[in-house]
Image (spheres, rainbow, N blue to C red):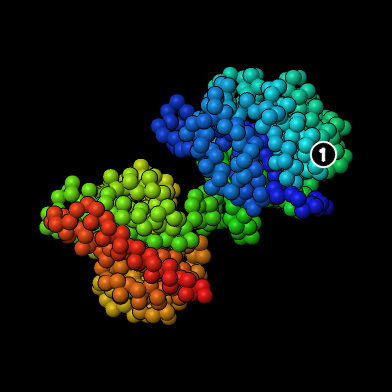
Amino acid sequence: MTNAHPDDGTKTLDVITIGRASVDLYGQQIGTKLEDIGSFAKSVGGCPTNISVGTARLGLKSALITRVGNEQMGRFIREQLGREGVETRGIATDPDRLTALVLLSVEAEGVSPMIFYRTDCADMALDESNIDEALIASSRSIVVTGTHFSRPNSEAAQKKAIRIAKANGARVAFDIDYRPNLWGLAGHDAGFERYVASDVVSQKYKSVLADCDLIVGTEEEVLIASGEADLLSALRTIRALSPATIVLKRGPMGCIVYDGPIPANLEDGIVGKGFPIEVYNVLGAGDAFMSGFLRGWLKGESHQTSATWANACGAFAVSRLLCAPEYPSWTELETFLAKGSPKRALRNDDNLNHIHWATNRRRQWPTLMALAIDHRSQLEDMPGAREDKIAAFKVLAVEAAARVADGRPGFGMLLDDKHGRKALFAAEAKGFWLARPVELPGSRPLRFEFSQDLGGRIIDWPVDHCLKVLCFFHPDDPADLKAAQIDKLQTAHDAARRVGRDILIEIIASKHGELKSDTTARALTELYDAGLRPDWWKLEPQADRAAWAAVDSVIETRDPFCRGVVLLGLEAPQAALEAGFAAARSSRTVKGFAVGRTIFAEAAKAWLAGTITDEEAVADMARRFGALVEIWERLGESKAA
């Protein structure tokens, strides 16, 4: 059986979810009481918000209708959904109420206490005025959720959405989403409580069943939606009220789909393929499940296929810590369905984790032109250099880069922690791509600057900042040296992944050996063989197009998700860089450049010596950076022509 749905071509959205929108604060220590959690990870949350993200990641065009507060948490929800590709025009800003918060933790397997901070919160103030008829009419389906039937205003809003959806040929899905304490039936400390019988709740839920095309719930939720005390009676009561497809979620046992009469033996329903995995955190698994089922249901797949996809999405969620951030992309799900995983704990599958990371990145950078001034020792060695003077000069470099960028996308900087703290603040305000070095300048074998504990060092970096590590690596180096270099690079790579930061690996081979046409490609092959898959490579200009073709082949074969390559400058004069740019423009993986001393060296020497003004220094750097940008863009236009 398939479930294809006719579309007259006017539908621009696949699904609109309605209801809760919160910020989840997840305890990062596992296996302890919520009372003893020391740090939290932030993500968007709430059943319909999670589903909007989950379906968007699976390739559906989704939207959310809710309210958020006029404060930083409300803006975070709106901005994060925008990054996920969720349509946000149905999100209203409530000037009087705060965005809901939820504190959560994993105390033991299957035990996840939570505290809802939802007193007079923004999303529960949703009312009929927030239901835009044109928005509902533009979608093939809507999802209404259980908690928003708990108050008259939000109940009226969802019922209005149902009426509009039915009038415009859209399908209605009901995620029962029963949380007793959000109905006032359990205490503040009982956020994890799943079932409290209530005739009031049952009557509310039963009043909408007839209008539904899809009803999804756990065993406890099916009981509350029907008002019955046993599962068979509950399913038959729902069937008597609604012809909808009913999906019974059964946790680690998967799900059963009922499309038609409810059989006496409940196992005789339609069962999707299950996935035996380790249960790490059950919170948010139902929303991931719903996302997978909706992908199949709305794409006309069989119920068995939809259920299999739903089970797989749920498996990802229970094997990882957070809710929406852990949901799979379509590419990730396809890979898992086709190849499975050797790990029962999917969070320990390096290949799936890499696909997850790479296909759910916060920002895309199809081109990147960066002014690199992460230099430390080179500036320290200049006459007149003092720590405060170097720091001030780096702020001037930010102003120079900003003049060239002029608000355009695709610009960035490399800045350091040692002298560049104020410059980093200034560059962050400009919206630049930012990378920060961790290597001890000039070290070979590679050592990290300040501390060898990179995870502890970079945890306080902004989430969009990229870890950059320079390594002098030649494929003809002695084996023991290469092993030491690779070991340090792996440490940096693992630290970046563990704390959720991009990593750029800069490889310079020419300082300690001949740079032949195959040298860089050989070096990258060895690094990929060692398990390194950085987001970016920073490479020196290659001798010819054949060398770039070899680099392209290695990257595209070994990691098609790599963001790409940026060229380094090595203080080459502009003419030499232009020749290097021309060769690099033949490459499919080179996305831009990150050049430093060619741009800032002369200005730095003069400014530190006191022979030019701030404005003259900024103007000189802007002129040199702008010239390289013009060359790069001109060569790109020639290539396109």
Horizontal arrangement in the rendering, residue 625 relative to residue 376 (left or right): right
Given residues 519 and 34, the one toward you in this image is 519
| Res. 443 image quadrant | bottom left
Whether 619 is drawn above or below 14: the answer is below
- Dot 1, crowdedness within 10 Å: few (<14), some or many (≥20)? few
Horizontal arrangement in the rendering, residue 59 relative to residue 593 (left or right): right
Whether 397 is drawn above or below 211: the answer is below
Residue 640 spot, x, y in % from top left: 51, 73
Residue 331 spot, x, y in % from top left: 60, 57
Q: Tell me if residue 448 can be seen.
A: no
Residue at 83 percent across and 33 percent down: it is: 210
Given residues 491 and 575, the one toward you in this image is 575
Residue at 23 percent across and 56 percent down: it is: 617
Q: Amino acid at mark 1?
A: Ala
Residue at 48 percent across and 71 percent down: it is: 637
Residue 558 spot, x, y in % from top left: 49, 67
Label 1, on which residue? Answer: 167
